[in-house]
Image: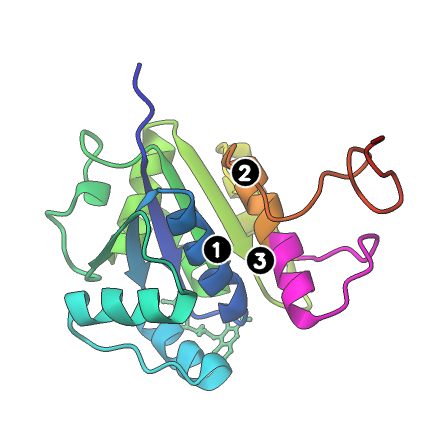
Amino acid sequence: MTVDPRLTLAITGASGMPYALTLLGALLEREQEVLLLVSDAAREVLRLEMDFELPADSDAAAQAWRARCGSTKGILRVLGKHEWTAAPASGSGAPRRMVICPCSMGTLAAIAAGLSNNLIERAADVVLKEGHRLILLPREMPFSALHLNNMARLARLGATVMPPCPAFYQQPQSLQDLVDFVVDRVLAQLDLPGLLPGWGRDSPQHPTPA
Ligand SMILES: Cc1cc2nc3c(=O)[nH]c(=O)nc-3n(C[C@H](O)[C@H](O)[C@H](O)COP(=O)(O)O)c2cc1C
């Protein structure tokens, strides 16, 4: 079977927009076709965290994303939240991989309850019902029992739940190093080339023999 180069990336209104931007750039650099969904709350958080005012028009938004993440590769399609005829809304047309980065507790709860009230929730519902790949990066601190229950529920349904928790054993020198660590783990889940050397293979502590 041919590998589907398409992937749905949803950005919701949790803190962590640098993760989203770095992930989008890495996916495009790896020649992926990204179907991008951005919630209204995410637009607000993008403005606050990145001084990034996302245009309302889809083509202009795609251009703005490319300018911000500095990639001219891959394919980027920006979809509206009520584009019910778009591929991710249908079991027969949806990409087999979906990442929600960052994932708000609101979107997490809506997916766990199967609400499908916007294209992000519907796309996640479709990926789950089809038994395809759903990767969530939920962000909140602390998590309530409700949040944890929703995560456990989705994990039991086959979703990969990976809160963005950077590690420090690579000795990060900058904020971008911490961001890269998280994005590297997401790329690994997608079987795509990562951003960092693999631990125990060619890390500074375990250099690859010359
Ligand atoms: C600056 C800012 C940061 C936020 N951070 C978080 C967060 O880390 N986690 C979270 O669940 N919600 C966070 N929120 C609240 C969500 O944006 C809000 O619950 C929203 O309804 C989520 O909608 P969405 O899931 O459609 O994106 C934040 C809001 C703002 C304005």
Can you name the residue that lies furthest to the top here? 1
Name the residue at the right extreme: 205
In the rendered structure, the answer to whether residue 58 lies left or right of residue 46 reads left
Q: Which residue is mark 2?
A: 193
x, y percent for residue 209: 85, 30
Q: Amino acid at mark 3?
A: His
Q: Which residues are magenta?
A: 165-182
Residue 192: percent from the left, percent from the top? Answer: 50, 36
Pointer 3: residues within 10 angstroms few (<14), some, or many (20+)?
Answer: some
Q: Quick one: SS at disc 1?
A: helix
Q: Amino acid at mark 2?
A: Pro
For the residues labelled 3 and 1, say whether their Cβ atoms are less than 8 Å apart. Answer: no
Specify the farthest residue to the front: 210
User: How packed is label 2: few (under 14 Cα within 10 Å), some, or many (20 or more)?
Assistant: few
Side (left or right) of 53 relative to 19: left
Residue occupying the point 10% across, 47% down: 85
Q: Is residue 127 above or below residue 172?
A: above
Residue 69 circle label: none
Crowd class of label 1 (few under 14; some 14 to 19; many from 20; radius 10 Å): many
Give the residue drawn at x 29%, y 72%: 64
The residue that disc 3 covers is 147
The foreground one among 147 and 64 is 64
Q: Quadrant of the C terminus?
A: top right
Q: CA distance from mark 3 to mark 1?
A: 24 Å
Position of residue 156 relative to residue 42, above or below, is: above
Residue that label 1 marks: 23
Closer to the camera in the image, 210 or 147:
210
- At mark 2, the secondary structure is loop
- Is residue 66 something one can see in this rendering? yes
Spatial CA distance of label 1 from label 2 is 12 Å
* Residue at the (32%, 28%) spot, across then down: 130
